[in-house]
Image (cartoon, grey):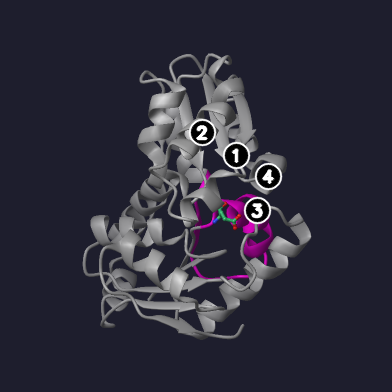
Amino acid sequence: MIGVFDSGIGGLTVVKEITKQLPGMPVLYLGDTARTPYGNKSAQTIQQYALQDAQFLIAQGATVLVIACNTASATAYQFLKSKISIPMFDVIIPAARKAATLTKKKRVGVIGTRATIASGAYTAELHNIDPAITVEGQECSMFVPLIEEGWAKKGETTRIVKLSLQGLKTKNIDTLILGCTHYPIIRNIIQVKIGKRVKLVDPAEEVVKELAQYLKAHLDLAQSLRSTVDHRFMVTDVTEHFQAIAQSWLKRSVKLERVSL
Ligand code: DGL
């Protein structure tokens, strides 16, 4: 199965994308809801957690891994690559590639959690592709709790988005990476506040495109992934609130299974 992990339920935006781009492909999802958020933790702790998440999914039968979490991708992908031997996809590389092709002015903005921005992973990847690109990072730590509290449509959220993006608006960017699992949910508000002309990149969309391409080139693996029946949603802590968010984001009935890592 395709193993997808995240610090919590945010990674369901990647599952949604898998359902769209790879219909009928079952997912083994792990959300570390007991230890969420990762975005305000140290790189060392995030690496430890991410390794446990990945090893758990492999033990459950995952044969390919997607790190849905931007924070874990930014701080732990290289570390995990040295420990894990199955194919693994992070969200940073595909999103950076897309942004590099979209930017005309070679000025790209990145928003994400504190840990993602502090890691400099998006900047490093964009410079890897094209050293002439200027990257402007902005942490937007307030967005995750607002979205998880169901405040996405409230005026307060719109005001906080405006305030958080004020600095970036003066940087003359033409492309903005939504570097956190939750941000696609308030994509429209971000678009309005950063300006209509700025192109938005959704890492969830890009990583699944990359996975789909890989599976096209590895048909045996693709075939074996299809052999199981349905998605499984595992979390390290279950609450009614997580359950309700999962169902409303995926627009289907979801049974969260509690697991211990
Ligand atoms: N899933 C995280 C990310 O994409 C956001 C939530 C957290 O901080 O754990 O960065």
Look at mark 2 in the image and give the residue it sits on. 161
Dot 2 amino acid type: Val
Q: Which residues are magenta?
A: 69-92
Q: Quadrant of the C terminus?
A: bottom right
Labels 4 & 2 near each other (Cβ < 8 A): no
Mark 3 crowd level (few <14, some 14–19, many ≥20, 10 Å Cα): many
| Comes first in the chain, label 4 or label 1 | 4
| Comes first in the chain, label 4 or label 2 | 4
Q: Nearer the viewer, mark 3 or mark 2?
A: 2
Mark 1 crowd level (few <14, some 14–19, many ≥20, 10 Å Cα): many
In space, the residues marked 3 and 4 are separated at their CA atoms by: 6 Å
| Comes first in the chain, label 3 or label 2 | 3
In space, the residues marked 4 and 1 are separated at their CA atoms by: 7 Å
Please indicate whether residue 13 sits to the left or right of residue 57 in the image: left
Residue at 50% over, 79% down: 238
Look at mark 1 in the image and give the residue it sits on. 140
Residue 50 drawn at (x, y percent): 63, 67
Labels 3 & 2 near each other (Cβ < 8 A): no
Q: Quadrant of the N terminus?
A: bottom left
Dot 3 amino acid type: Gly
Per the rendering, the mark at residue 50 is none
Labels 3 & 4 near each other (Cβ < 8 A): yes
State yes or no: Cβ of the residue under disc 3 lies below 8 Å from any atom of ligand 1: yes
Does residue 3 appear in the picture of this structure? Answer: no
Question: Is 89 rendered above or below residue 201?
Answer: below
Labels 2 & 1 near each other (Cβ < 8 A): yes
Look at mark 3 in the image and give the residue it sits on. 39
| Comes first in the chain, label 3 or label 1 | 3
In space, the residues marked 4 and 2 are separated at their CA atoms by: 16 Å
Look at mark 4 in the image and give the residue it sits on. 114
Front one among 215 and 114: 114
Dot 1 amino acid type: Cys
